[in-house]
Image (cartoon, grey):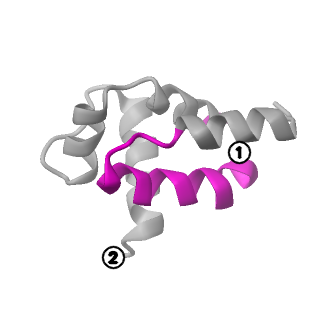
């Protein structure tokens, strides 16, 4: 799917969660990485944005993992981008 500038702005602002730990992960990812993702990962990221902040916080702090394999894949991808092993 081809995203317009307006779509990308909407995704960027939807990435702003109001929780610092999530904002520092998601906002740069949305701005710098999302536009170049393959369509499958773009869909996963959009699906991730519909999740609850507390769930995302737990996933990104590696306290729990998403049960949904699609969400797990994008969480792992984001963590790999910001915390290389």
Magenta residue check for 26: yes
Residue at x 48% of width, y 51% of height: 26
Question: Which residue in the structure is indicated by mark 1?
Answer: 38
Task: Classify residue 75 as left or right of residue 35.
Answer: left
- Disc 1 crowd, CA 10 A, few/some/many (<14, 14-19, 20+): few
- Quarter of the picture containing the C terminus is bottom left
Q: Which residues are magenta?
A: 15-40
Measuring from the top left, give residue 3's x and y in whole percent.
82, 35
Would you place residue 78 above or below residue 71 in this image? below
Give 83 or 10, whichever is nearer the viewer: 10
Q: Main secondary structure of the magenta part?
A: helix
Measuring from the top left, give residue 32's x and y in whole percent.
66, 61
Measuring from the top left, give residue 60's x and y in whole percent.
28, 51
Residue extending farthest front: 18
Question: Which residue in the structure is indicated by mark 2?
Answer: 85
Residue at x 81% of width, y 30% of height: 1
Disc on res. 25: none
In terms of secondary structure, where does tag 1 sit? Answer: loop
Measuring from the top left, give residue 58's x and y in whole percent.
19, 43
In terms of secondary structure, where does tag 2 sit? Answer: loop
Task: Classify residue 61 as left or right of residue 22.
Answer: left
Q: Are marks 1 and 2 in contact (CB under 8 Å)?
A: no
Magenta residue check for 12: no
Residue extending farthest left: 63
């Amino acid at each position: 799917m081809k995203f317009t500038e307006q779509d990308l702005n909407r995704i960027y602002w939807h990435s702003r969660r109001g929780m610092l730990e999530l904002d520092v992960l998601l906002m740069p990812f949305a701005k710098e990485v999302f536009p170049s993702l393959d369509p499958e990962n773009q869909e996963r990221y959009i699906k991730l944005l519909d999740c609850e902040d507390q769930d995302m916080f737990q996933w990104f702090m590696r306290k729990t993992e998403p049960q949904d394999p699609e969400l797990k894949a994008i969480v792992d991808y984001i963590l790999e981008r910001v915390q290389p092993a």
